[in-house]
Image: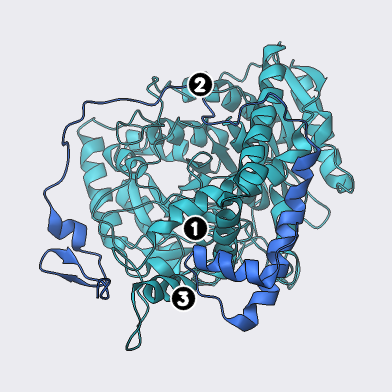
């Protein structure tokens, strides 16, 4: 499986990473190289094998569905590049 | 001996006897750090915090309330969130980020009285094997055999360089595919990746959540046992952190491994393996045999597929974990031109903030998780992962106590030497270590010898799940038998 320039452009957009048109051929080539390396997995017989979901045979912990933490908006917003009036601020998203 | 050269065990004993103070040891380390700028290991120094913690530790020791790590100065990998102190995973995208909270691992260390000297550089988001992807520039290994600058390995390269150069008594590391064990091997120190779930991941910047584990990087096996005992805990904040008691790992260090069955996996004997690594492996096998262990040749048939499975699973998880870096809540946000909207903000922020290797892995992960490819790549890799774990389960069920392998396929290489290499070539550094993460097992790298150039080489012992005590004991026997005492000659 090799990745062409259109696919590389699409993947970059899905990943929300801007890639200049001139950089797409190199990216496509590198991604193709990595995918070719992964093709080895097709040699393995995986019939009847369940995909692993947890590496330790352990049930995830449960707890009561109650609020256990919170009420410090200042700390939450402290590292925001742009915070105003208790909110994260972003460019306009609704016209 | 200069105080910065102490092991944790020696410092603990001397502190207890009142022969030294934590302030004295801490000051010795801070002076060494200031003089070691050429190594580029520390990316943030915290001398004020260190001295305040050292004073508090001295008071605690005097009062007779001193856990083992009390007063021990440490370096902390930049991946751990430390309250009020820059924590940016060596990435531009987390520029300026100062967490409002403390990771569980570092909190456990501070609760025990340990001292933070500063933050240690690493590969960006722990993605790399040479520390060259750090936004702070590469870390330089203290080891030097010619005019080249060598890599300390990665991703915990700052931790490895700092411990090997005696800038701190020990350091924290994290290991997703070998990021503790490979740099430990490259720099002649000890590094253990615990069983998945032994150490809390809370507050550690996530790379691949089903593979990430934190562990100690130390000057001796005993130190690794002491420090792991403090790092490990049960933690309600990490749902994958196991609710099982943390044993006294140091108490397991009896030095007696008679009757233990050590497996030698034939699939780890790779084509083109340097003769020196092969000899090191044979020597290590002989050392364990001489100590009374039974050596058994074993087969782990799916070993060959561990690297490709890892390089599907880890990027898939990374693409999801790193989606949070969007320029909204923390770190870098790109400057926007008039008329640019929120998607431009995401795309420009992430293009500016992530380095090339991180971008590549996010995109590979995005691709293998995208509609139409999920089954072919991601689910297939997870099935292969189940088979890799099954290989180990079968070996342990047959009575094998632990498995001895080389830690790395070579000794350290020069900085820049892999610059034009295919990304996959760099991935081959992890060939002996990724299996352990995929199977969730504990693995430890122990320095065993020097190659002809004079560079350290390590062997890896892989243990049964939750049997770190037993594993550390076998590592201690290997350490004692190898008698590795080489240190890098100071040039920095």
From the viewer's perspective, is A7 left or right of A63? right
Residue that numbered label 2 is attached to: A57
Q: Is mark 3 on a helix, strand or loop?
A: helix
Residue B127 screen position, x and y as percent: 56, 57
Q: In the picture, residue A8 is in which quadrant?
A: bottom right
For the residue labelled by badge 2, is the local secondary structure a helix, a strand or a loop? loop
Horizontally, is B176 left or right of B305 in the view? left
- In percent of the image, x 69 and y 30: which residue is there? B388
- The residue at 63%/49% (across/down) is B373
Task: Compute the Cα span from label 3 to label 1.
Answer: 15 Å
Q: Which chain is blue?
A: A
**Host chain of mark 1:** B
Q: Badge 2 sits on which subunit? A: A
Q: In which quarter of the image is residue A34?
A: bottom right
Alpha carbon separation for disc pair 2 and 1: 28 Å
**What secondary structure is marked by label 1?**
helix
- Dividing the picture into quadrants, the one containing residue B336 is bottom left
Q: In this view, does B109 lie to the left or right of B128?
A: left
Instruction: Tell which chain the image draws in cyan.
Output: B
What is the number of the mark on residue B125? Answer: 1
Residue B167: horizontal and vertical position, in percent? 48, 57
């Amino acid at each position: 499986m090799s990745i062409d320039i259109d696919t590389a452009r699409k993947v970059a957009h899905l990943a929300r990473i801007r890639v200049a048109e001139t950089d797409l051929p190199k990216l496509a080539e590198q991604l193709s190289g990595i995918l070719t390396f992964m093709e080895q997995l097709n040699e393995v017989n995986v019939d009847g094998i369940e995909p692993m979901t947890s590496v330790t045979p352990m049930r995830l912990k449960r707890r009561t569905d109650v609020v256990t933490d919170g009420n410090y908006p200042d700390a939450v917003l402290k590292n925001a590049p742009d915070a105003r009036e208790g909110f994260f601020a972003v460019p306009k998203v609704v016209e | 001996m200069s105080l910065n050269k102490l092991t944790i065990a020696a410092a603990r004993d001397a502190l207890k006897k009142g022969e030294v103070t934590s302030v004295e040891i801490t000051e010795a380390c801070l002076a060494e750090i200031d003089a070691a700028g050429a190594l580029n290991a520390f990316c943030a120094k915290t001398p004020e915090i260190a001295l305040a913690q050292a004073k508090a530790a001295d008071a605690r020791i005097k009062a007779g309330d001193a856990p083992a790590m009390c007063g021990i100065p440490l370096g902390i990998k930049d991946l751990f969130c430390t309250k009020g102190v820059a924590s940016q995973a060596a990435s531009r995208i987390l520029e300026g980020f100062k967490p409002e909270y403390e990771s569980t691992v570092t909190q456990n260390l501070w609760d025990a009285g340990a001292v933070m000297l500063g933050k240690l550089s690493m590969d960006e988001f722990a993605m790399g094997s040479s520390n060259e992807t750090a936004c702070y520039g590469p870390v330089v290994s203290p080891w030097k055999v010619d005019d080249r600058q060598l890599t300390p390995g990665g991703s915990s390269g700052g931790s490895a360089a700092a411990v090997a150069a005696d800038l701190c008594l020990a350091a924290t590391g994290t290991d997703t595919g070998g990021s503790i064990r490979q740099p430990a091997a490259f720099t002649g120190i000890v590094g253990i990746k615990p069983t998945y779930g032994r150490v809390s991941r809370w507050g550690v910047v996530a790379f691949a959540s089903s593979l990430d584990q934190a562990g100690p990087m130390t000057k001796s096996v005993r130190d690794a046992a002491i420090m792991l005992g403090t790092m490990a805990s049960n933690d309600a904040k990490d749902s994958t952190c196991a609710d099982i008691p943390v044993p006294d790992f140091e108490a397991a260090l009896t030095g007696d491994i008679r009757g233990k069955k050590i497996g030698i996996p034939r699939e780890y004997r790779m084509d083109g393996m340097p003769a020196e690594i092969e000899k090191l492996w044979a020597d290590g096998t002989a050392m364990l045999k001489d100590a009374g262990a039974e050596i058994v040749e074993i087969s782990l048939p799916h070993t060959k597929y561990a690297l490709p499975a890892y390089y599907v699973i880890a990027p898939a998880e990374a693409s999801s974990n790193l989606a949070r870096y969007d320029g909204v809540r923390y770190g870098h946000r790109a400057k926007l031109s008039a008329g640019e909207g929120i998607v431009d903000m995401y795309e420009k922020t992430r293009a500016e903030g992530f380095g090339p290797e991180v971008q590549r892995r996010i995109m590979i992960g995005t691709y293998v998780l995208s509609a139409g490819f999920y089954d072919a790549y991601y689910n297939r890799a997870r099935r292969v992962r189940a088979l890799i774990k099954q290989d180990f389960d079968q070996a342990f069920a047959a009575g094998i106590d632990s498995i001895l392998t080389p830690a790395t396929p070579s000794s350290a290489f020069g900085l820049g030497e892999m610059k034009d290499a295919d990304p996959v070539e760099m991935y081959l550094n992890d060939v002996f270590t990724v299996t352990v993460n995929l199977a969730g097992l504990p693995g430890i790298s122990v320095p065993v010898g020097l190659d002809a150039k004079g560079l350290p080489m390590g062997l890896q012992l892989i243990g049964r799940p939750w049997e770190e005590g037993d594993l550390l004991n076998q590592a201690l026997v290997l350490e004692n038998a190898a008698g590795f005492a080489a240190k890098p000659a100071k040039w920095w």
